[in-house]
Amino acid sequence: MKVKVLALLMLASMGVQATDCTNAGIQPSTDESVNFEAFADGTAIDHGTGLMWMRCSLGQTWVPLTSICSGAALKVGWDKMIDINLFNKIGFAGKQDWRLPNINELRSIVEDCRSDPAINTILFPGTASAKYWTASPYVGLATNAWVVDFGQGRDNFELKTNVNYVRLVRVAD
């Protein structure tokens, strides 16, 4: 059963924009009341892209009654990426087809109206203001891959041997 986060309903009923923007002059780019739908199982669907996201970073645990991510997120090297197939045997939210997002997919959840972290923290609580891996290798250098830095919302490439955070995605049903 789909369950929206209680806080979102309360804010909507008060006529308050729920997105936690820190720059009031910029409209939210990931407004959870427009394109996103958050679920009690720790997932959120972006109806604009058709993608389902894990609300927590890999390594964190979703706590449904509080809508928070607890624990420490994992940092891994791109070239030593944890075996996603093994992760999918266990599954998350009843799904077993999670994967690393490509650069464009991960860019799509950057929140333009805030920084540190540059992400909607209502939808994605506990997100580090740090770099997250994408599945996109950097074409110019085989030793590098693209990252999105949720500190300032920028992307860049870096060595695959560096360690960064991971957020998984899948195509929504």
Image: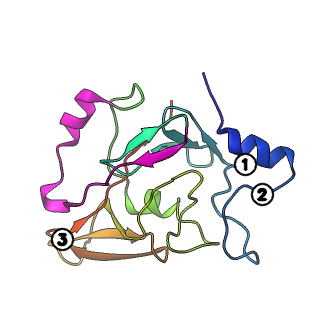
**Dot placed on the residue nearer the N-terminal end, 1 or 3:** 1
User: Is 8 left or right of 114, judged from the image as shown?
Assistant: right
Where disc 1 sits, the SS reads loop
Residue 166: image location, x then y, percent: 32, 55
Q: Which residue is mark 1?
A: 33
Q: Is residue 40 above or below residue 94?
A: below
Q: Are marks 1 and 2 in contact (CB under 8 Å)?
A: yes
**Dot placed on the residue nearer the N-terminal end, 1 or 2:** 2
Of discs 3 and 2, which sits in the foreground? 2
In the image, 29 versus 163, the foreground residue is: 163
Q: CA distance from mark 1 to mark 2?
A: 8 Å
Choose top left, top right, bottom left or bottom right for residue 135: bottom left
Q: Which residues are magenta?
A: 66-91
User: Is 100 left or right of 5, judged from the image as shown?
Assistant: left
User: Is 80 left or right of 56, judged from the image as shown?
Assistant: left
Q: Which residue is mark 3?
A: 162
User: Can you tell which mark lies on residue 173?
Assistant: none
Q: Which residue is mark 2?
A: 17
Residue 107 sits inside the magenta stretch: no
* Amino acid type at image mark 1: Ser
Instruction: Write the residue at 24% across / 60% down.
Output: 75
Q: Is residue 108 visible?
A: yes
Instruction: Write the residue at 76% across / 78% down.
Output: 25
**Dot placed on the residue nearer the N-terminal end, 3 or 2:** 2
* Amino acid type at image mark 2: Gln
Residue 90: image location, x then y, percent: 26, 28
Dot 1 alpha-carbon crowd within 10 angstroms: few under 14, some 14 to 19, many 20 or more: some
